[in-house]
Image (tube, helix red, strand yellow):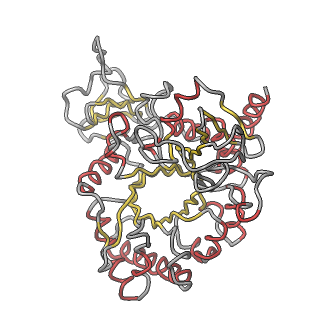
Amino acid sequence: MTKLTLLAALGILLTVQMVASTKLVCYMTNWSQYRPGNGKFMPEHIDPFLCTHVVYALATISPDNQITTVEWNDDVLYKSLNELKKVNPTLKTLLSVGGTVDGVSPYINMVATPENRKTFIRSAMLFLRLHEFDGMDIDWQYPGQNLSPPEDKQRFTVFVKELRQAVEQEAIDTRKTPLILSSKVSGIKSIIEDAYEIAEVSGLLDFITVLTFDYHGHWDSKTGHNSPLYRSSLDSGSVIDHNINSSVATWLGGGAHADRLLITFPTFGRTFLLSTSQTGLGAPANGPADAGPYTREEGFWSYYEICPMESSVPIEWIGEQMVPYAVQGKSWVGFDNLESFTAKVQWLNSLNLGGASVWTLDLDDFAGRFCYHGAYPLVNHLRNTLGFAPKPTTTPRPTTTADPIASFCVGKPDGLYPNPADETTYFQCFRGNTYLQKCQPGLVFVDDCKCCDYP
């Protein structure tokens, strides 16, 4: 009863505060193509109307300071992703650049000298335009710690400033829409303080994705949640600020623009192997639970590997942190579900943050094969809870008896076609799927120009 009351209250608040969120930025990974069976994810699985931005992870930086691909078929996947903009022209795509090379961020060498930075910026802008991306996402999580020189904090600001200047100049010279600049940054307070000149960087980036997950995991000696909203009464010492509320408070306290901050909604959970009969939050643990059958990484389960448990084991709720966990045998997993997503949206809207990011599309039940709640149950719920407008109607491909509308695009080339039954709507064909689109009020679809115009 408590949970139902909470959700009802959150629903009322969300109705009032929906206008705060303007972005739903969703990441996809180029390594998810290697998962077996139904876990394999390709750009073709992306719903073009689900997110406002899709970020492709990951490209990197070569030793000679050039942007470069990581996977053998990245260029093919780039094309497949960016073709989605033919279906939804408002969709924006970005390329995330970073990661690590032998455990070290490739940015460390690149930002070290003006010449290195100039070389990278020139190569990156040409690369983004060549592959039809709308911008770049700077994966700056690792500088500021371990092998990174302390001056990298200032070098990052200089790099972003030079990149911003180059973007603006290119837009003037070419009369193209300026490239979008974003950054994926740490949510750990100590790293934030070491790695970022917050106020300066915030003013130079279009948005900042705070990675609000991996606060706890199998590296800890006791169970803790992957992405808690608030501090637990059990938290102390070095982990006292390992929660979303503390992370965002650190960014805002440092001068970040609230309307450019996004918090990350993880579509995965972190697992522990229980070492005693205790099963609650803070229970003793000894390493990770077994790897999931599709993600195949110890200590890490995708939502589609977790959701089948919901019908067989109790889902426990951590009230003070507004997140769930489950126990199956000796395996303990802290994850996110529809209820925790709702609570987090209510919280981010109360601060007028810029919106949400998702890590990642390929870890949700992207094809609806596991959770029995349709495709993308978590991300669709997040989109709806943020208050975005309803997506255009998608008519599914026929399975038995062909429906004249559902089967309209079967065998037709991609493109726009009039709807004989309603001149204020039209069909958009893409990969054999039929999308029913609506013209603006007062306009009708004109086949000659493939556009909506006055009758």
Q: Position of residue 256 (x, y in %)?
A: 65, 68
Q: Is residue 314 above or below residue 183?
A: above
> Could one spot residue 46 in this view of the protein?
yes
50 in relation to 62, above or below? above
| Apparent side of residue 257 relative to residue 237 in the rendered image (left or right) | left
| Outermost residue, front side | 276
Q: Nearer the viewer, residue 175 or 8?
A: 8
In this picture, residue 322 sits left or right of residue 292: right
Residue 263 visible, this orientation: no
Judging depth in this view, the residue of 208 and 113 nearest the camera is 113
Residue drawn where x is 52% and y is 65% of the image = 206
Residue 1 at x, y = what percent?
Answer: 78, 25
Please tell me which residue lies in front, 287 or 378: 287
Residue 69, placed above or below residue 156: above
Q: Quadrant location of residue 337?
A: top right
Residue in the image at 56% along x and 36% along y:
381
Identified at 26% across, 64% down, the residue is: 130
The residue drawn where x is 58% and y is 60% is 210
Q: Quadrant of residue 323?
A: top right
**Position in image of residue 379 (x %, y %):** 52, 40
Extreme-top residue of the structure: 401
Q: Position of residue 204 (x, y in %)?
A: 53, 73
For the C terminus, the quadrant is top left
